[in-house]
Image (spheres, rainbow, N blue to C red):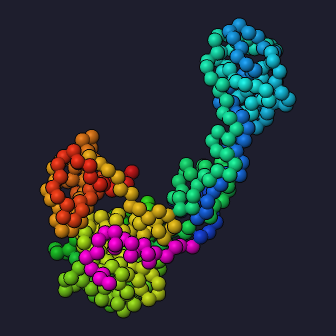
Amino acid sequence: MSLKNLTVEDARARMLGAAVRTAIHTLPLAEADGLTLAEDIHAVRDQPPFDASAMDGWAVIGDPAEGDQLRIAGESAAGRGHDGALRPGQAVRIFTGAAVPAGATRVIIQEDTMRDGDIVRIARPPSPGPNIRRAGGDFQAGTLLLKAGTRLDPWRLSLAAAAGRAALQVSARPTLAILATGEELVSPGGHPGPFQIFESGSAGLVPMIARWGGLAHRLSPARDDEDAIAAAVAGADAELIITVGGASVGDYDLVKPALKRLGLELLVETINVRPGKPTWFGTLSDGRRVLGLPGNPASAFVCAELFLKPLIAAMSGGAAGPLMEPAILAQDLPAAGPREHWMRAILGSEGVRALPDQDSSLVTVFAAADALLRRRANAPAVKAGTFVEILRLNRG
């Protein structure tokens, strides 16, 4: 079985097939934001559990007309309903969210009425509509509200709370460690020599991973030395190790040889993708997984979208993706080359447009992009107005 020059789909499938689920634990709602639900959530009762008023006003029977007078029979407020059934000729003062009294068929909004002691008079033709939220109108007992694998956010947590849940079973955040390698790298804030550059890849990967539900920390950049690389990875407390750089075929690409000392077994060696052909994936003898990303930050970020994000989702028990969508092409594009090309692109009112310079070393290009435009290997030339596949980048 060849490990080289795999398609994006084949490489991703091999990575996801080796993903190990994180532990499942129970957390209160306040601590579950951003985590992945590990259980199905069903409604235990109707919501609302009773017919409820949608407005402040008066609960009545039938359709009173302008000038009609009704005797006030009581009041219904949120959490405190009116006892007894409503009778013809009566009205019950009611507030938004309160239970509609038995027998009432509509709520007349207070702006259409005038009160005089124990009498309420219909002061003008009532606004149309019953103004009643029916029992079970939001959801009914037994309804599946949230499926296992759903990424939790404030709105979904609110739904769980509406179902009466105070705590949820969730998957723990996958733990990741990021190791950038290369004698040319200096940590941001340091003092680079004349032939060194600031290490910028992990600065972007850490917050990416956080947005995707993982928990990452950066290891100190390792020099081009097998002992240093092996020692850094051996001591990394993480379920998934991300290496950045040292993954091509040069004399100083030492990551894979160094990790062979830790029992590295490769599942993916190279991928037929641009940028990011040197991307690789494997397992260590202690069970930790390793994803090797290219050293150029733009290449690393593209391959993080294609492979790392789905890996984190799979480890959390969520949908692996990525989520592709169609977009109108705003420019002509020439025929694609032999490698699948994920072009950094901008979405506009006329459609999607690839940025003019796709050099994988340019961080400025990726910083300007809000989508990746997919060009299949050996795809023919396409004209503006054609539908193409894009992966939208989360720039919010």
Tell me which residue sits at (23%, 79%) in the image: 248
Observer able to see residue 328: yes
155 on left or right of 387: right
Tell me if residue 73 comes above or below residue 42 in the rendering: above
Name the residue at the right extreme: 84
Name the residue at the left extreme: 334
Considering depth in this image, is 163 or 251 the residue closer to the camera? Answer: 163
Name the residue at the top extreme: 67
Q: Which residues are magenta?
A: 1-23
Tell me which residue sits at (34%, 72%) in the image: 10
Q: State the image coordinates of residue 14 (x, y, percent, origin top left).
A: 38, 76
Name the residue at the bottom extreme: 261
Observer able to see residue 361: no
Asked if the magenta segment contains residue 21, the reply would be yes
Tell me if residue 189 comes above or below residue 227 in the rendering: above
Tell me if residue 318 comes above or below residue 280 in the rendering: above
Tell me which residue sits at (70%, 24%) in the image: 106
Considering depth in this image, is 187 or 315 the residue closer to the camera? Answer: 315
Tell me which residue sits at (68%, 52%) in the image: 142
214 on left or right of 231: right
Q: State the image coordinates of residue 208 (x, y, percent, origin top left).
A: 39, 62
Q: How many marks?
A: 0
User: Which of the 4 quarters of the picture holds residue 62?
Assistant: top right
Tell me if residue 47 comes above or below residue 214 in the rendering: above
Name the quarter where the N terminus is drawn.
bottom left
Q: State the image coordinates of residue 16 (x, y, percent, origin top left).
A: 42, 72
User: Which of the 4 quarters of the picture holds residue 196?
Assistant: bottom left
User: Which of the 4 quarters of the picture holds residue 225?
Assistant: bottom left
Q: State the image coordinates of residue 26 (x, y, percent, origin top left).
A: 64, 66
Asked if the magenta segment contains residue 236, the reply would be no
